[in-house]
Image (tube, rainbow, N blue to C red):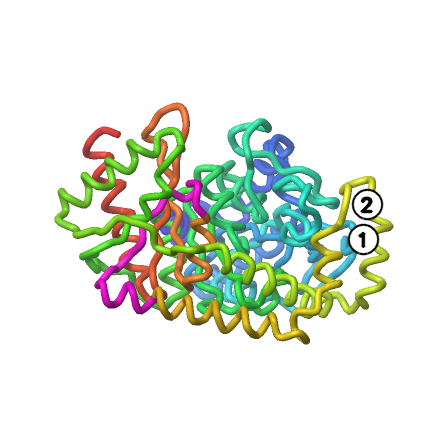
């Protein structure tokens, strides 16, 4: 769809102003059902007009995303009239003096930011009792399938906005599942980079070690187009030769056995070798290390964005959030009470996680494995596996089962994005040829 829209601009069949105006009207008409957008960019039409004038004057498009409407998560800094509140009433009037690096990239390519999406407040780092998709500033975001369905988070609004066709693509962030789970739960494609692949400068997250940027689209082609631009690499036909299937993920979920059988049949038909099993054994110690890293880095990094002292922040949280919005703020309190940096736990955890990452890289290399395949919402923690192992994560939603949809994950080493996308494309085509 992105390339088609760009062609319509080139041909003069539609202007950016007309297209952006249509999206803004559609948002006004439809988003009350989903509550996925927390702020609308009141200057979006001005930006659209500038792009039309640029095209008239220069006889060329500004960039490879010229006039493409995008929504971004509310923890991504913008130097404009949009606040960067992280979904909190505490920071509803916080305006950044800088753009996140990903925002500068979007603008340089000619994208039009329609607004910011609702999210789990502070990237779901407030209370263990909070609902996914809820923030004190934005309220509750609802799943594309209805209010009785899980919406996922913390990038809830970004996933739902794409599912509802309120933009062409959206951007979220992930510490541990915040991109891939809402994508799977709302039936959209998503790709999450590794934390050190794409700059997270200007992202207000939880952990600099884990936080990474992710993209949502309704069409795989659009997602592939964006990832191609960001990696400066043309995604070509790089054939997958061998994969690891995380078999334990395809259990106890309605339809998962059928999907597992179809994946095996696909691999056999295309003569792709595979191994099944458990990719990460003895996960429990590493979950504790994730927690230590997140507590330590939230405490040391989060407030630097807002120029507020920890005691003042805690007081505001108790005054503004407790009672009206949350029964507790235990995630925040335990982070600020922790002492993991000075007692050595943080350094030890980082060291162990780096060793784990290295061992998983080495395992795939020794076994000549290109990708790891798993059910995204299966009983094991697929997002954690990907993040701890330092892999990219592509989510592929499937609606071939009729009344409900499933999504499976393709995990790969950085630089193997082409293999992940080609695998997804080939499997979707295989299902289509089987009339599924």
Callout 1–callout 2 Cβ contact below 8 Å: yes
> Along the horizontal axis of the image, is 274 left or right of 206?
left
**Residue underneath mark 2:** 322
Where is mark 1, residue-wise?
317
Q: Does residue 300 belong to the magenta stretch?
A: no
Instruction: Indicate the position of residue 193 as horizontal and vertical percent values.
Output: 44, 61
> What range of the chain is rendered magenta?
361-380
Which residue: 60% across, 71% down? Answer: 346
* Quadrant containing the N terminus in the rendered view: top left
Camera-nearest residue between 86 and 336: 336
Quarter of the image for residue 397 reads: top left
**Residue 88 pos. (x, y %):** 74, 51
Residue 369 colored magenta? Answer: yes
> Can you give x and y, in whole percent of width and height, for residue 127 in the image?
70, 47
Provide the secondary structure element on which disc 2 rests.
loop
Task: Report the residue that reaches farthest toward the top.
Answer: 403
């Amino acid at each position: 769809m992105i390339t088609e829209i760009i062609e319509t601009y080139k041909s003069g069949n539609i202007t950016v102003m007309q297209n952006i105006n249509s999206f803004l009207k559609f948002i006004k008409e439809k988003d009350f059902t989903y509550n996925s957008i927390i702020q609308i960019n009141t200057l979006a039409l001005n930006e659209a007009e500038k792009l039309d004038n640029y095209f008239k004057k220069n006889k060329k498009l500004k960039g490879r995303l010229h006039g493409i409407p995008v929504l971004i998560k509310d923890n991504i800094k913008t130097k404009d009239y949009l606040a960067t509140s992280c979904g909190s009433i505490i920071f509803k009037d916080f305006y950044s003096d800088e753009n996140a690096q990903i925002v500068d990239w979007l603008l340089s390519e000619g994208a039009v930011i329609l607004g910011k999406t609702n999210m789990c407040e502070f990237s779901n780092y407030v209370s263990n009792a909070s609902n996914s998709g809820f923030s004190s500033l934005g309220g509750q975001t609802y799943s594309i399938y209805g209010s009785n369905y899980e919406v996922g988070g913390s990038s809830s609004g970004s996933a739902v906005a794409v599912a509802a066709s309120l933009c062409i693509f959206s951007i979220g962030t992930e510490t541990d599942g915040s991109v891939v789970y809402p994508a799977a739960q709302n039936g959209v494609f998503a790709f999450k980079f590794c934390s050190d692949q794409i700059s997270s400068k200007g992202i207000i997250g939880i952990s600099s070690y884990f936080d990474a940027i992710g993209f949502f689209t309704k069409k795989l082609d659009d997602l592939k187009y964006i990832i191609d631009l960001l990696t400066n690499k043309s995604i070509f036909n790089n054939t997958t030769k061998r994969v690891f299937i995380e078999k334990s993920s395809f259990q106890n979920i309605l339809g998962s056995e059928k999907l597992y059988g179809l994946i095996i049949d696909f691999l056999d038909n295309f003569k792709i070798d595979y191994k099944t099993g458990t990719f990460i054994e003895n996960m429990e110690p590493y979950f504790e290390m994730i927690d230590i890293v997140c507590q330590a880095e939230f405490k040391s990094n989060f407030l630097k964005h807002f120029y507020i002292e920890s005691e003042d922040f805690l007081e505001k949280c108790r005054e503004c959030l407790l009672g009206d919005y949350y029964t507790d703020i235990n995630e925040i309190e335990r982070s600020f009470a922790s002492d993991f940096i000075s007692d050595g736990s943080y350094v030890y955890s980082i060291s162990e996680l780096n060793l784990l990452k290295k061992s998983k890289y080495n395992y795939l290399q020794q076994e000549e494995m290109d990708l790891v395949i798993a059910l995204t919402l299966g009983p094991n923690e697929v997002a954690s596996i990907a993040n701890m192992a330092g892999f990219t994560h592509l989510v592929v939603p499937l609606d071939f089962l009729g009344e409900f949809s499933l999504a499976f994950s393709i995990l790969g080493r950085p630089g193997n994005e082409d293999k992940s996308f080609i695998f997804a494309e080939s499997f979707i085509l295989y299902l289509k040829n089987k009339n599924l």
